[in-house]
Image (spheres, rainbow, N blue to C red):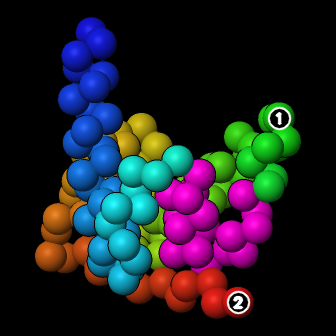
Amino acid sequence: MEFLGFILGIIALVGMWKMFEKADEPGWAAIVPFYNVWVMLKIAGLNPLFILIMLIPFVNVVFGLFMSYKFVESYGFGVGGFLLYIFFSPIMTIYMGFSEDVQYVGEKYEN
């Protein structure tokens, strides 16, 4: 079972790398802890300093879901795409990263 988790993690990482590149961010940022959340917030159009909210217990869960929704929305998906992203994350990140039909349509947060 650990091997399956490892493989799904690698798949999700590769998809996230491609998603970052579609948003004109460095793909390698997907593998750097904390910085990947910073970049996701920026791609989602949220102030990257909201990463501090992720340090508050229980609030981080609600904000993490909100951040994920805004992140998926920035690629043109709605609530249905968000739910697929939450429940089938490795599959959705690969689809969103490699599909020609999915493009970054959001507005990045600019200082």
**Which quadrant of the view contains residue 45?**
bottom right
Q: Residue at x 81, y 35 (%)?
A: 58
Amino acid at the residue labelled 1: Pro
Query: Dominant secondary structure of the magenta stretch?
Result: helix
Tag on residue 111?
2
N-terminal label among 2 and 1: 1
81 vs 4, nearest the viewer: 4
Q: Is residue 54 left or right of residue 35?
A: right
**12 w.r.t. 105: above or below:** above
**Which quadrant of the view contains residue 11?**
top left
**Percent from the top left, x then y, of residue 97?**
25, 64
**Percent from the top left, x then y, of residue 95?**
22, 58
Q: How many marks?
A: 2
69 vs 34, nearest the viewer: 34
**Percent from the top left, x then y, of residue 103?**
29, 80
Tag on residue 57?
1
Q: Residue at x 71, y 40 (%)?
A: 61
Tag on residue 83?
none
Amino acid at the residue labelled 2: Asn
Q: Residue at x 46, y 52 (%)?
A: 32
Secondary element at image label 2: loop
Label 2 – label 1 distance at C-alpha: 27 Å
Secondary element at image label 1: loop
Q: Depth-wise, is mark 2 or mark 1 nearer the camera?
A: 2
Magenta part of the protein: which range? Answer: 34-51
Q: Quadrant of the N terminus?
A: top left
| Mark 2 closeness class: few <14, some 14–19, many ≥20 residues within 10 Å | few
